[in-house]
Structures are given as structure tokens and as C-alpha cells.
Image: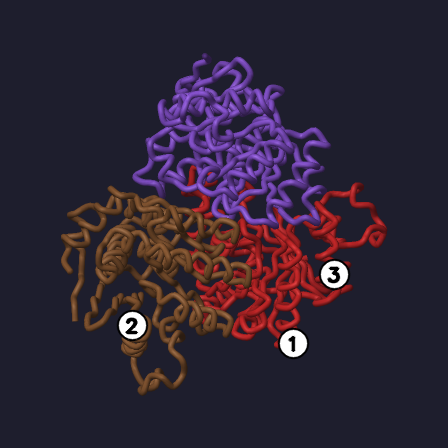
Chain colours: A red, B brown, C purple
Amino acid sequence: MKAEDVWQDIERVRNDAPLVHNITNYVVMNNTANALLAVGASPVMAHALDEVEEMVNIASALVVNIGTLSVPWIEAMFRAADAARERGIRIVFDPVGAGATKFRTETSREFLESFRPTVIRGNPSEIMALVKEGVLTKGVDSRHDSEAAVDAAVYLNREYGSVVSISGEVDRIVTDGRIIMIENGDPMMPRVTGLGCTASALTGAFVAVDGSPFEGAAAAMAVMGIAGEMAAGKSGGPGSFQVEFLDALYRIGEDDVRRRLKLAEA
Amino acid sequence: MKAEDVWQDIERVRNDAPLVHNITNYVVMNNTANALLAVGASPVMAHALDEVEEMVNIASALVVNIGTLSVPWIEAMFRAADAARERGIRIVFDPVGAGATKFRTETSREFLESFRPTVIRGNPSEIMALVKEGVLTKGVDSRHDSEAAVDAAVYLNREYGSVVSISGEVDRIVTDGRIIMIENGDPMMPRVTGLGCTASALTGAFVAVDGSPFEGAAAAMAVMGIAGEMAAGKSGGPGSFQVEFLDALYRIGEDDVRRRLKLAEA
Amino acid sequence: MKAEDVWQDIERVRNDAPLVHNITNYVVMNNTANALLAVGASPVMAHALDEVEEMVNIASALVVNIGTLSVPWIEAMFRAADAARERGIRIVFDPVGAGATKFRTETSREFLESFRPTVIRGNPSEIMALVKEGVLTKGVDSRHDSEAAVDAAVYLNREYGSVVSISGEVDRIVTDGRIIMIENGDPMMPRVTGLGCTASALTGAFVAVDGSPFEGAAAAMAVMGIAGEMAAGKSGGPGSFQVEFLDALYRIGEDDVRRRLKLAEA
């Protein structure tokens, strides 16, 4: 995957303005809607059992994020994912906080078993929490987080067919026999709430327009990282960073992608 | 309606700081609260059945917005609107996403039938979705959206007595025999989530202070458009636009209104 | 308490990055999460009955805020507070809107009776609303709000052992026999939604790292006020103020504290 492929995906998002249906957490709804609008996609947030199926039917992708999970929302997530699978649109799953509580870990695993989402996007500890204890032969503690997370991703890909997108200093996007590594980004990004959730929302937009969910997921992470670098150069803290980040998503051009992209495939 | 009338309404909002009770969606709660504060009004968000009536009793206007609708919230909306009608405070209704799902369309129509809100504020497709199929003699598809929406607005006004405020490149505020058109605004505005919801919240503040809900609704749209123009001149994308927009609502002065207002009455 | 004590608390927050579990309102979740991250703490938002206890078990403080209260959330708040008390972590309670509706006033009083929170943080009218009618011998109306609120705070401290932190032009932090007054801050702060809630969230972070909850609560209010002053110098309205405020929380240094702190103890 090269800079021109990332750029082509950005142009597709801007031209097609795919409708991304988000069932996500209260903390980030505003940010992720704004990020989708800034990059050129169309967001919709809807979680009522009475309408999720109908909303899925006009959407180009479904993003499910368990950040402020509760039982009524789980029911909506599962109903929406059922409709998405039936209609054949792509599903991005963000297991926010998996590993922190059993409730999140178990809901996440049940979601994977039930829907085999197109993309699973999370940080290393969340991705590792999705794998049942004892499944991976090497202990998590004995290795770098990023290596252990890749092992977990390979396992999840084999088990569910999902592309696994792991964010970190180096983002790693994993599918059957391929790994893309992206080194863009900025240390300020973890100081802003919900940028991981934004990555998942953008992944929804990009897998809606790219024939390959693997490359779409990678393009989304590349755009996150490049916009983060563009924002960092203009900001004096996490407040101004957020503002500049949205502006960068809106303004990102072919030159920004060509000059900045640090992508390698293993 | 002239620039001085718009300015007078702004001064009234700043002097009276009307308490606007919002039952609105998760995505925009923060933005609309901040927009109300910036323009000089006082926001309160409350949706519990246990307190909506009591909150209505200290409020100067009620704004109901169905952006992330669910059944428990509908009950609160209806109970609050009942209390508002009984107390005689004005009700602004924003049918976000009406037409996208039956759930939203039907809930909206039931709200109109039950409460005949003072103002209905939405975009053309939402306003048209409020009118039952077959009621308007000319088909929606055969004409410009804005014309068809005005037809729908005239119908809704006749049926429910509501002022209808339609946002768009040209905002149109419709009541019995009068239409105000406002050409202020900026193309960046649809790239920011929830500015329509902000328009509804400000409409609540302005109809709370203006004897004429028609002119109050128009003043709110004028303020939105003028603040949008003020923000556009200082921003480099949708992130900075939002920041500048709140600053503009706070700073808007008589001169800004006089120089910028593009308002015509048909 | 001196500038060096405030600065030491800031350094502790930055070094320890205490996990602050927030059960708070929809309007401010994003802001408070960002403020905690900006100052160096780690936020988590979780309200499901299925996980609040487990989340409390990995947190360093619990912040309960009743801003958009509803019955299911009350149950979660009480369950989380039970777990926090059992585990011995500190609880900050923000009675947003107490006095405005019976629902909020009564829920707040029940929370106080049940959990005797480490810190109660609110504005003068909220603090006064927590005291049952007729308990204070001097009528509320006969005195300045701030004096009446201090009387209420002394009463609440005696009754529940809680430190009481009252925000206002002068913040007053009250415990048994001691009152700290802080005169930092800026008139723009009440024009931004949720800065009171942010103060409560930061109070959670600071009482998590300071042995004395009284001094921790005061340090949090000092940081709020100083960051507000730093932001005010760089902003042109409530939109840019919010952005600069987060940047200031991130950048605040020893010099800012030493030069700006206006703290007196009575």
C-alpha cells in the first residue's frame, strides 16, 4: 500500500460521503461526528431498538464502540450488527476498555463470535483482552506489548476473519499473512479523549469506500497519524490540538500524504 | 423585520438570560449549552421523568430535539411539553432525522398533533417528512427542495399554528401569510455537527424574549448566520470554525448585525 | 497551604496519573475527560450496574455528578459509592442543580446520608440546598450568598465529615475549623458549560494524590482558577477560552502557580 492508495481513499470518502452509522459512547459522540464530517463522510448516531435496523439500511458502514456500555445499548448493538451482516455492509468494532471489566470483555467476545466484524480496532491491551486466557502459547507478560498484540491479532484474524487494527506509537494493521505498520502520529494524541474512538469511526468511513477492508483500515490510521502531525505543529496543548486536528482532517491534501506517510508492510 | 429588531432581541437575551430547558440529543448537548451561554441565555438539560415538569416550571422556553431518540426519552419529552403547554411557555421542536426512520417521523408527527409547538425548526427534508404522504398536491420531486419545503411549512402552519423555520443556504421562516428569508451563513456550517440543533436551542432563547415567535425565530436564524460569517473569516477548518462561532455569539454587536444582515420578507 | 503545596500536588497528579472514575452527566463527559487528561490524570467513564464495582476497584477516586440525573443512573451511583467506601478510595460528590428540583435535592441528601463523601463540591446555591430547611438559624435570604453557603458548609462538614468546596468569585474550601479562600479565576468561566463539573473531576484527581482531602480539594480549585487566568489572557470569547483552558491545564508550571496563586486561610 502506497501514498497514492491512501490519497485515493481520501478522495473517495470526500466524493461519496459515505453514511457511517455509529453506536458509540457518550463521551466521544460529538468528536467522532465532527471527525467524520471533517474528513468528508456523513455521520449518524442512532441507538434505539425501534430504529437501528432502519438506520443500518441507509448506511454504508456500521461502527460499534462499547465505551460507555450498558445493557440496553448492547441489545441495540447486536440488533444493528445483525441488520448490517444481513445487508452486507461492513462492521467496525471498537472494544473500548475490554480487559478492564468482565462486562466489557465478555460483551466484546460475544460480539466477535456473533458477527465476525470486518475490522476490530483497539489498543494493544484491548486487542489482547479479546483472546481467551491460555489460547496464546507465549505469555503476554514476557514480551513487548506490541508483539503480544500482533500475536493476538493474528489469532483473532484466523478465528473470525477480521482485519485487526492496533493503535500505538506504531499502528499495526493485521490480516491473513499481511501486516501494515504506520509510524505517523504525535505524542499529544493520547492526551485527547476519544481519538481512538475517532480512529474507529474513520475506519468505518474508509472501509465503506475501499474494496479491501485491510487497506481501508490502514488508510484510516494513516490519515489519523498524518492529521495528528499536522495538528501538532500548530498547537500548544491538547485543547488546541483537538481543534487543529479537525482542521487537518478537513484540509489534508495529496502533498501532506506523500510527504508524511511512513508506512511499511511486513 | 429589520436589523434593529434583531439587535433588540439579542439585547433582551443578554439582559434577561432566559432559562432554556433542553431535552436534546447526546451528540450536541455540550455545544448547545455552550451556544446558549455564549449568546447570553441560561441552558438547563434535564430529561428524567421525575423532574422534567418541575424544570419546565422554572424555564422560559422548552426545546425538544429528537436527535438520539429512544422510548424513555419520548415519555420525558411529552411530559415536559405537557407541562410547558399548561404553563404557557413556548415550545421549539426540532425533528432531527424525521424521514430517515419511521420511528422519528411518527414520533415527530405525534408530537405536533399533541402539542402544536410554537416553532418547528428543521432542514427541508425534515420539514417535508412531517407532512403525510399525499397531502400536498405537488410532488416533492418535481420542484426545488426549498420550494417544496415552504409548501410543507405553509401546510404545517395551517394545521398546527406553528411557525416553521427551515434552515438552508437561505433560511426561510414561515407563518400565516408571512415568510422571512435570511441569506446569512457560511458553507462551513454543515461541516460542523449539531449547528442545526444549536439553531433550535437559540430559537428557544429568542422566542422566550420576543413577543412574536415568528420574529424571534427569525432573529435566532439571523444570529446563527451572522455568527457563522464572523467565524468563517477567522477559521481554517471545521475545528477552528466551532471555536470562533462560540466567540462570535458572545461578541456579536449592533454593527455586525447592521452591516451583515441579509433579511427579506416575502 | 502554600504555592509549593499546590505545585507538589500537580506534580503528583502528573507522575501518578491517578485513574478517576466518573459517573457524570452527558453534557460534560467529554470536557471532564479532556481536563483530567490535560492535567495528567487518567479518566474513565462507566455507569453500567454490571461493571461499576469492578471499575471502582481499579480507580484511585470516584466522582459522582448528578447533572443529567435519572433513576437508572442513581442506582449505579449508589452501587459505585458503596464499592468506593468499602475499598476506601475517596469520593467527590457534585450536587449539580440541587435546589432546582426535588429530585436532585433529595437524591443529593440521600447520597450524603449514605456515603458521607470525602468532598462535596458545588456552587453556593447547591451547597445551601443540601441543608434541610430550618436547620440553620439564620435565614439564607438575610445574608450574602457566600456567607450563607459557608454556614451550610460548616453544617455539612459537622454532619457528614465532608470537606465542602464552594466555587464562586472567591472559592471557599471548608473543613472542621479551617477555611481556605482562593481568589483566582476569570469572569469568562461561568460562560463555559461544565467548568464546575470539571472542577469536581479535578478534585477527584487531587484528593487521590494528596494525603489531606482538604488541601487536595483546595489545590484543585487553585489549578482551575490559575488555568482560567492563563486562558483568559489568550482568548476572545468562551469558545477560544475552553481551548486555551485545556492547554493551560497541560502547561501550568511552578512559576504560574507561584506568581498567580491568591490563597488565604481563615
- Amino acid bearing label 1: Glu
- Is C170 in front, or is C237? C170
Element class at badge 1: helix
- Is B50 in front, or is B30? B50
Alpha-carbon span between mark 2 and mark 3: 50 Å
Q: Position of residue A58 (x, y in %)?
A: 52, 74
User: Do the residues at pointers 3 and 1 share their chain?
Assistant: yes
Element class at badge 3: helix
Nearest to N terminus: mark 3 or mark 1: 1
Chain holding disc 1: A
Give the position of the C terminus of chain C as an image quadrant. top left
- Left or right of C260 in this view: C158: right
Residue located beneath label 1 in the image:
A86
- Amino acid bearing label 3: Glu
Q: Position of residue B147 (x, y in %)?
A: 27, 77
Q: A264 above or below B96?
A: above
- Left or right of C60 in this view: A38: left
Instruction: Single out the mark in the foreground, 2 or 3.
Output: 2
- Amino acid bearing label 2: Asn
Residue located beneath label 3 in the image:
A110
- Is A217 in front, or is A128? A128
Residue located beneath label 2 in the image:
B157
Q: Residue at x 54, y 62 (%)?
A: B70
